[in-house]
Image (cartoon, helix red, strand yellow):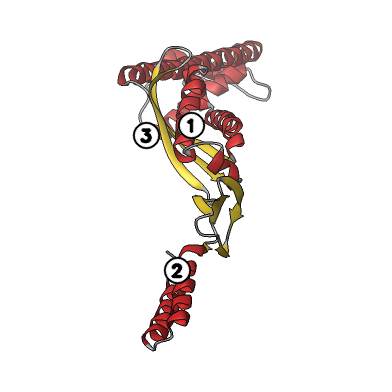
């Protein structure tokens, strides 16, 4: 009972008691009758509540929010509907996907009652019905989807669930705000197999990249060889530069055969503007 109804009932009953004790029986009885009428007839609905009222078994109306009266005995409140957004978790255990993989799927649905009359009169228990429809639809979606779709296309699955559930609950006065799949659990053995498959795919991709790099490097080497073949002096300068870079970075002493030194010296002496050094004693 709401506090306003309780307060007015107590006040009128107290006043009736005072008149009754003072000898004004008819007035006292009238106040008692008013208190009893308020007790049974005055109702208050909160902002999120809707009272579905039947009059002599027929639908009379939806009352609320605020204060309202009903006729005792004739009117009957058969349901108090909460039209706020409700959150209902649901799941499907060991449901088979289209490729016969058993999965456990947990999801949550956000819904609300947009028509209190239908929710009260079209179905016995709309709370239980929403849960049952959500579970059944989830199993249907799993059975028509591949495992890869459930794992990779989560948003698309959520949208399909929302549309399917909404089409089934619309006649009950219930709207679906959204449906979200929270988790898709697969067997441990399958997780290991998928992990190995992903690792093999990454290794394959790495080998393809490495092979492409080798082809590009080989092409560059062929081009460099052609350039050096037409210009031996450039080859000698490149060799000397490699020797210099090696000793500079590593700080090591490199022993070079005298034949190689003579070859480098001979090659440099043939460059334009260069004179080969004379041997000692010549």
Cβ atoms under marks 3 and 1 closer than 8 Å:
no
3D distance between C-alphas at marks 2 and 1: 45 Å
Name the residue rendered at 64%, 11% in the picture: 226
Instruction: Point out residue 58 in the picture as x, y percentages from the top left corner.
Output: 59, 45
> What is the total number of numbered labels drawn onto the structure image?
3
Which marked residue is nearer to the observer: mark 2 or mark 3? 2
Query: Disc 2 designates what residue?
Result: 36
Tag 3 secondary structure: loop
Give the numbered dot on residue 134.
1
The residue drawn where x is 48% and y is 26% is 138
Q: Nearer the viewer, residue 252 or 201?
A: 201
Q: Secondary structure at mark 1?
A: helix
Secondary structure beneath dot 2 equals helix
Q: Residues within 10 Å of mark 1 (few under 14, many from 20)?
A: many
- Between disc 2 and disc 1, whose residue precedes? 2
Q: Which residue is mark 3?
A: 251
The mark lying in front, picked from 2 and 1, is 2
């Amino acid at each position: 009972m709401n506090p306003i109804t309780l307060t007015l009932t107590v006040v009128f009953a107290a006043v009736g008691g005072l008149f009754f004790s003072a000898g004004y029986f008819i007035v006292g009885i009238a106040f008692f009758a008013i208190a009893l009428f308020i007790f049974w007839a005055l109702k208050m609905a909160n902002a999120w509540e809707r009272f579905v009222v039947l009059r002599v078994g027929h639908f009379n109306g939806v009352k609320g929010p605020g204060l309202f009266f009903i006729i005792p005995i004739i009117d009957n409140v058969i349901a108090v509907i909460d039209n706020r957004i409700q959150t209902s978790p649901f799941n499907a255990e060991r449901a088979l996907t289209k490729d016969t993989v058993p999965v456990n799927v947990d999801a949550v649905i956000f819904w609300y009652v947009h028509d209190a009359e239908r929710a009260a009169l079209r179905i016995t228990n709309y709370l239980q019905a929403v849960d049952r429809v959500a579970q059944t639809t989830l199993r249907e979606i799993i059975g028509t989807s591949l495992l890869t779709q459930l794992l990779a296309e989560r948003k698309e699955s959520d949208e399909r669930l929302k549309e399917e559930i909404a089409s089934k609950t619309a006649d009950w006065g219930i709207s679906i705000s959204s449906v979200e799949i929270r988790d898709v659990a697969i067997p441990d053995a399958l997780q290991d197999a998928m992990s190995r498959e992903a690792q093999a795919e990454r290794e394959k991709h790495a080998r393809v990249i490495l092979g492409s790099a080798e082809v590009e490097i080989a092409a560059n080497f062929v081009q460099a060889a052609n350039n050096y073949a037409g210009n031996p002096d450039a080859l000698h300068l490149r060799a000397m530069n490699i020797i210099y870079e090696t000793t500079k970075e590593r700080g090591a002493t490199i022993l070079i055969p005298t034949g190689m030194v003579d070859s480098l010296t001979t090659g440099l002496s043939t460059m334009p503007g260069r004179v080969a050094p004379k041997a000692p004693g010549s």
